[in-house]
Amino acid sequence: MLRYLSHRLLEAAVVLLGMSFLIYLLLGLMPGDPIDLMASGDPNITSADLARLKAVYGLDRPLLERYGHWLHGALTGDFGYSRLYALPVTELMAPRLGNTALLMGASFALALVLALPAGVLAAVRQRSWLDYGLNLFAFAGISLPSFWLALLMILLFAVTLGWLPAGGVHAVGDDSLGNRALHLVLPVLTLTLLTVGGMLRFTRSAMIETLRADYIRTARAKGLGPRGVVLGHALRNAMIPVVTILALNFGTLFSGSMVVETMFAYQGMGKMIYDAIIGNDFNLALVGLLFATLLTLLSNLGADVVYAWLDPRISYVD
Amino acid sequence: MSTEPAPTDPTAIGAWSAAGDRPLAAAARGPAGAGVSPGRMVLRRFLRHRLGVISAGVLVLLTLACLAAPLVAALLGHDPNLVDLFGRFAGPSASHPLGTDELGRDLLLRLLYGGQVSLFVGLVGAIAAAVLGTLIGVVAGYLGGRIDALLMRLTDAVIALPLLPLLIVLAAVDLTKLGVPEDVARAESASLYRILLIVVLAGWTTVARLVRGAALSVRAHDFVRAAVALGARPVRIMVAHLLPNIASPIIVATTLSVGGVILTESVLSFLGLGIQPPLPSWGNMLTNAQELIWQAPQLAIYPGLLIFVTVIAFNFVGDALQDAMDPRAHEP
C-alpha cells in the first residue's frame, strides 16, 4: 500500500509539473503584455524605459529560462505577487480557499443527503411513477446551464421575492455569521441543484446493478425482508462505485463552483482564477489553477484509497 | 456499464448485429428480434421510449425553425443585427413577436440565428470529438504497451481535471501570438472554429475509453485471430472488425455528449470567451442579462430556456438510444 501511494504521489507530481509548464506557456499567449499594460498608464514612457522594464522583470529572457526561474521560486515557497492586488499570491488565496471550501463542502453534503436516499428509492421502486419523477428531475439537473440556473435563482429569490441577497459574501458593514450564511444560501442551493442530478442517477444505477447480484437473491431466498436486503446487503456494496465516482467528480464540482462564484460575486478560488485570467494577472491565475489541479489530483488519489478500504477484494500490492 | 462487448455473452453487441442474417437465432432470443433487421429492431425499441420520441420531435422542429431563420427574417422585414436604440426592451408586437433586446434587436430572430450556431457547435463538436476519441482509443487499444499506458493516463487526467478554468485560458489565448495572421484571427468565424477546437479537446475522452476497451477485447476473438492469420493488416482489422462491433455504443456516447458540448459552448460564450458578438449564440445572448435583470428579466429567460430544452432533449434521445441499442438493458 505504501509503495502504491508513493508511486501515485510521484505520478501526481509529474502531472502537476507538466500542467505548470502548459499553463505557463498558455498564459504567455494571452492578449496583453504586463509591460504594455504599464506603458499604457504612462504617456511619457520611452522605448528605452520599456526595454529596461523588460530587463528588470526578466521578460527579455527566453521562455524556458523564465519558466525555470518561476519554478525555482515556487519550489522554494515563493509564489510571487499578484499584479491586480499587489499582494503575495499566497496571502490572497487563503481566505478565498476557505470560502470555496465552504461553498463546495456545503453543496456536496446537501446533494449527497438528497441523492443517496432518492437514488436508492428509485432503484428499489424501479419503473414506478416515483422512479420516473426522480429520473426526470435528475435529467433536468444535468441539463441545466449553470449560469442560467444562477440567473433564474437571482431572478426568483432576489429580484421577484426579495428574500435573499443577489450576491457577495456579506453585506457592507455587517459580516456577522448570520449575514454570511444568508449570502451563502443561493450559491449553495444553485451548486446543489447542479450536482444532485448526476449523483442521483449514479446511485440509482449502482443500486440496480447490485440488486441483480447473486448474493441478493440468496438473501431473499433465505427469507430476508426487503428492508433487510436493501439496507443490510445491497446498500454497502452499491456505495463502493458511488464513492469513487463522487471523488472523481471533484473537477466538475470545481468548474460548477467557478461559475456559481462568478455569478453570485462570491469571493472564492473560482472567481479569483476567472478574474485573474480576465485581468491579465498571470501569476495569480497560474498559481490558482495549479492549486486547483493539485486538489483534484489529491481527491482522485483519496478516491482510490477509499475504494480499496471499502472493497477488501481490491488490493494495491503489486 | 455495458461498454465492452463480452465475448461469451450471446446478446453482446457483436453477436447481436449479425441477428438480421440469422432470423432463427434472433427469434430464439426474444419476441422483439423475430425476423427483423437490427435497424428496425432498434427503431421499434426506440419508439417505445416516449420521452425519447418526443425529444427527437422537439429537436427536429427546433432545427427546422433555426434553419428557417432567413425566411422569418424576410417575413418580419428586419435583420438580426439591426440596432434600433429607440426600440430597446420593446414588448411583443407583430413586427417583434418576442420583443427586442437592450440594443433594440429582434429577440426571435437572434434566438433562431443563435440556435444555428449553438446546434452547429453541439453536433459538429460532438462528432469531431467522437472521431478523435475513436482514433486515440484504437491506437491505445491495438498497439497496447507503453503507448496505451501513456494515452490512458492522459485520458484519466483530462477526465479528472477542473476543465472549465483551463478551457477559459484556452479560449482567451491570443491567436496572433501563435503566428496566426491578424485578419484570420479577427474574422467573425474565428471564434466559431476556436470553440469547436476547444470542445473537441475537452470531449474526446469517453469515446476513447470505450473504443480502447473494445479494441483490447476484440484482439482475443477467434475471428480476429483468423483475420490476422490470413494476413489482414491492423487498419483492416480495425475498420472491418472492430468499428462495426462498437458502432452502437459510440453512437450512444456521441448523442449523450451533444448536450455537454452545447453547455460548454454556452458557458464560454456567456463569459465572453466563446462565440463573439455580433454573431449570436444562445450563450452570448445572456452575457448582458445579469446586469439587465432588474430592468428586463424577460431577456434572461428565452436563450437559457432554449439551451435547457435542447440539452435535455439530446440527453433523452441518447438515453432512449442506449435502451434501444443495448439488448441487455431490457432484461428484468
Image (cartoon, helix red, strand yellow):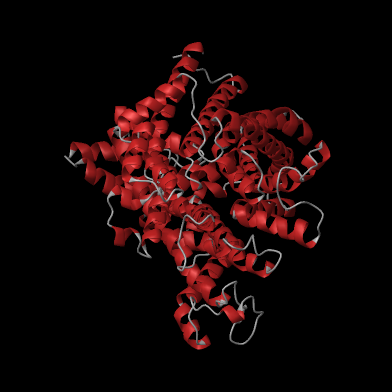
Residue B18 in sight here: no
Residue B137 horizontal side relative to residue B272, left or right: left
In this picture, is B174 found above or below A227? below
Query: For the image shown, how many numbered marks are present on the structure?
Result: 0
Residue at x 59%, y 29% (from the top left corner): A91
Residue extending furthest toward the top = A2
Residue B173 in sight here: yes
Residue at x 44%, y 34% (from the top left corner): B157
Residue B133 horizontal side relative to residue A102, left or right: left
Residue extending furthest toward the front = A44
In this picture, is B96 found above or below B130? below
Residue at x 59%, y 40% (from the top left corner): A253
Residue extending furthest toward the left = B231
Q: Quadrant of residue A177?
A: top right
The one nearer the camera, A66 or A270, is: A66
**Residue A43 image offset from top left, x and y in percent:** 42, 51
In this picture, is B57 found above or below B202? below
The one nearer the camera, A279 or A2, is: A279
**Residue A288 image offset from top left, x and y in percent:** 52, 35
Q: Quadrant of residue B298?
A: bottom right
Residue A305 horizontal side relative to residue B79, left or right: right
**Residue B254 image offset from top left, x and y in percent:** 44, 53
The one nearer the camera, B224 or A21, is: A21
The one nearer the camera, A1 or A176, is: A176
